[in-house]
């Protein structure tokens, strides 16, 4: 008797619930997972007619299927990351440029027009705010980690009032690690009153909240608080009668004299405003400025020379009155002596001046050519005596510093013989293990700022956020926008800086000097009025200054006009294209 035949097997639709990758076409079963990946083969790629659940289970456990499934999940994850990356970059651009959150949706639309996939989710103002908060918190976490390595730090504070007439304080933190000083934005906070106690309380509270430091740690590590008092006035000077006063020869002569003096102070101010300027640099910079001011007693400056050469008019404007040589000599001595006295009083007199003078050894290039045993010994003694109350509780052994100072000098002079540009970073690399205590002490001194100029630059960056657009966003949004400034890999890395030729000069032009963030970037011939800068840190603010340099007939090369062409560039992430200034 014949055996009964096995019934024909057919595809069962309920299998797709257990195996979502399964589909049927032309009477055959296929695997959507394996079929979507290149260089795959097998029955479920070419089509299987083995309608058994065991065949499906066997394929699901196969190495090829698992590998293809992992690749799909990875691709999906990468696509999500790319979409979120674009959204975060756009939010960062909003914070960086001080734009309102309402710009965020159209920035996402712009990305779509450029062929980028940003998805349909998170494209609203609320999510933009959350993205910025996340970026800011990540930056704060990085700062917390870094501060744990810095044994000393200083706080720089400056205040202003915004459009809502609310007192606002901007805070920066300065610290040094292994001989390299750093300045980072800390917070932008609102305070009730701009007095010493309120500001101090706000600093402590900010350090506790943002950096998670205890009060004990704050008082152990905080070396100084640098503030810049601001004065506001509601009075407005009237213009009536000013023109008559301004067109007298006396006013023209004195204004020209003050302009020459201001030029000297301007150079000194720029030097002191450099982020990496420490108190040890002040003495040399000040001595140069004082020497230039004293020279005005012997020879008038450029602006005063131009004013003295015209008697009846000045720059085409008729002037009246007289001003004789005796009056001029008295005025020059009065102005120069007054400025010298105030500069010395501000920077050199008293205990702070003595400390400043003792820190000159921080400028390695100014060390004596010949090694002497006495160099710096008295300075170290003065500084140790001043900082002694906090050194007892610090990580360093202060009693070892004088001994290690002598050893450190040996290392420094050996390094100076082989390097023209020696830095404390290089010294730390060689001598940190041998002279740990004195190098910790150097880090303490380098953490002290020479000025609060970084706070002023911070207010410049918030000039939009703290005005019309600041009101709905609040102070947290301002602080978040600042913290986002350090985000990497979000835009172009080069810019082109251009400038115009001077409209007039008082001598023969020689070249252009280009400065980037206070440091000389290049000396260019007169035929060049643009400069390509590469290798920039992404989403970092760069300030470029071009200074036309030349020579008058009876003097050494010097600046020929005081109207510097300033280009302030912020690399934007709105479009991932090279930025041109």
Image: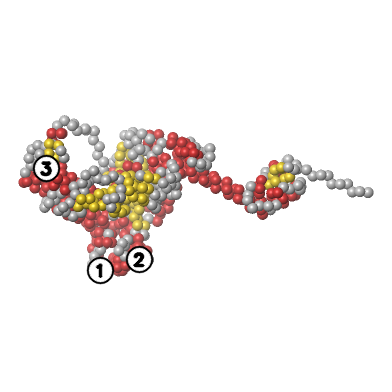
Element type where label 2 sits in the image: helix
Residue 249 x %, y %: 10, 40
Residue 377 x %, y %: 25, 64
Question: Can residue 393 be seen at all in this image of the molecule?
Answer: no
Query: Are there few (<14), some (14-19), or many (20+) residues within 10 Å of tag 2?
Result: some
Along the line of sight, the residue nearer the viewer: 22 or 441: 22
Give the residue at x 28% y 48%: 546
Along the line of sight, the residue nearer the viewer: 119 or 302: 302
Residue 406 x %, y %: 29, 68
Give the residue at x 76% y 48%: 50
Q: Earlier in the sequence, mark 2 or mark 1?
A: 1
Residue 289 x %, y %: 19, 52
Q: Nearer the viewer, mark 2 or mark 3?
A: 3
Element type where label 3 sits in the image: loop
Quadrant of residue 23 within the rendered picture: top right
Give the residue at x 8% y 47%: 329
Along the line of sight, the residue nearer the viewer: 33 or 309: 309
The quarter of the image holding the C terminus is: top left
Q: Which mark is residue 310?
A: 3
Mark 1–mark 3 Cα distance, whole angstroms, equals 54 Å
Quadrant of residue 169 within the rendered picture: top left
Q: Which mark is residue 431?
A: 2
Q: Are marks 2 and 1 in contact (CB under 8 Å)?
A: no
Compared to residue 436, the image places residue 115 above or below, namely above
Q: Earlier in the sequence, mark 2 or mark 3?
A: 3
Q: Which mark is residue 371?
A: 1
Mark 2–mark 3 Cα distance, whole angstroms, equals 61 Å
């Amino acid at each position: 008797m014949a055996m009964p035949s096995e019934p024909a097997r057919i595809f069962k639709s309920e299998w797709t619930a257990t195996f979502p990758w399964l589909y049927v076409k032309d009477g055959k079963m296929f695997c959507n997972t394996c079929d979507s990946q290149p260089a795959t083969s097998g029955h479920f790629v070419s089509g299987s007619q083995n309608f058994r659940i065991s065949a499906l289970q066997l394929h699901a456990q196969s190495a090829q299927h698992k590998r293809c499934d992992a690749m799909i999940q990875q691709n999906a994850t990468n696509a999500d990351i790319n979409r979120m990356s674009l959204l975060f970059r756009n939010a960062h651009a909003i914070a960086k440029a001080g734009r309102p959150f309402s710009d965020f949706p159209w920035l996402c639309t712009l990305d779509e027009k450029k062929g980028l996939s940003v998805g349909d989710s998170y494209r609203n103002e609320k999510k933009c705010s959350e993205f910025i908060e996340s970026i800011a918190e990540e930056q704060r976490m990085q700062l917390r980690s870094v501060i744990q390595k810095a044994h000393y730090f200083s706080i720089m504070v400056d205040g202003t009032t915004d459009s809502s007439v609310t007192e606002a304080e901007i805070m920066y933190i300065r610290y040094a690690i292994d001989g390299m000083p750093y300045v980072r934005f800390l917070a932008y906070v609102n305070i009730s009153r701009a007095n010493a106690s309120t500001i101090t309380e706000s600093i402590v509270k900010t350090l506790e909240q943002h950096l998670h430091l205890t009060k004990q740690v704050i008082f152990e590590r905080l070396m100084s608080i640098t503030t810049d008092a601001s004065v506001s006035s509601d009075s407005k000077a009237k213009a009536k009668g000013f023109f008559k006063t301004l067109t007298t020869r006396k006013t023209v002569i004195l204004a020209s004299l003050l302009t020459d003096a201001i030029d000297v102070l301007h150079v000194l101010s720029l030097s002191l405003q450099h982020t990496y300027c420490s108190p040890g640099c002040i003495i040399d910079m000040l001595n140069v400025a004082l020497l230039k001011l004293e020279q005005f007693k012997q020879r008038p400056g450029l602006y005063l020379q131009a004013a003295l050469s015209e008697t009846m008019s000045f720059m085409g404007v008729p002037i009246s009155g007289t001003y004789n040589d005796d009056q001029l000599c008295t005025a020059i001595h009065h102005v120069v002596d007054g400025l010298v006295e105030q500069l010395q009083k501000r920077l050199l007199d008293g205990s702070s001046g003595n400390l400043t003078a003792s820190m000159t050894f921080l400028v390695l290039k100014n060390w004596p050519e010949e090694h002497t045993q006495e160099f710096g010994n008295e300075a170290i003694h003065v500084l140790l005596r001043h900082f002694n109350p906090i050194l007892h509780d610090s990580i360093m052994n202060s009693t070892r510093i004088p001994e290690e100072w002598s050893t450190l000098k040996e290392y420094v002079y050996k390094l100076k013989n082989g390097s023209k540009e020696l830095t404390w970073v290089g010294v730390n690399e060689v001598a940190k293990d041998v002279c740990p205590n004195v190098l910790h002490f150097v880090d303490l001194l380098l953490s002290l700022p020479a000025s609060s100029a970084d706070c002023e630059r911070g207010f410049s960056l918030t000039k939009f956020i703290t005005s019309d657009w600041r009101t709905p966003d609040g102070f947290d949004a301002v602080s978040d926008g600042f913290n986002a400034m350090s985000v990497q890999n979000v835009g172009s890395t080069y810019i082109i800086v251009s400038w115009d030729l001077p409209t007039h000069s008082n001598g023969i032009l020689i070249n252009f000097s280009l400065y980037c963030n206070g440091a000389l970037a290049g000396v260019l011939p007169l035929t060049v009025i643009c400069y390509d800068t590469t290798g920039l840190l992404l989403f970092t603010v760069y300030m470029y200054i071009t200074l036309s340099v030349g020579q008058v007939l009876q003097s050494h090369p010097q600046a020929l006009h005081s109207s510097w062409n300033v280009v302030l560039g912020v690399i934007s992430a709105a479009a991932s294209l090279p930025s041109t200034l």
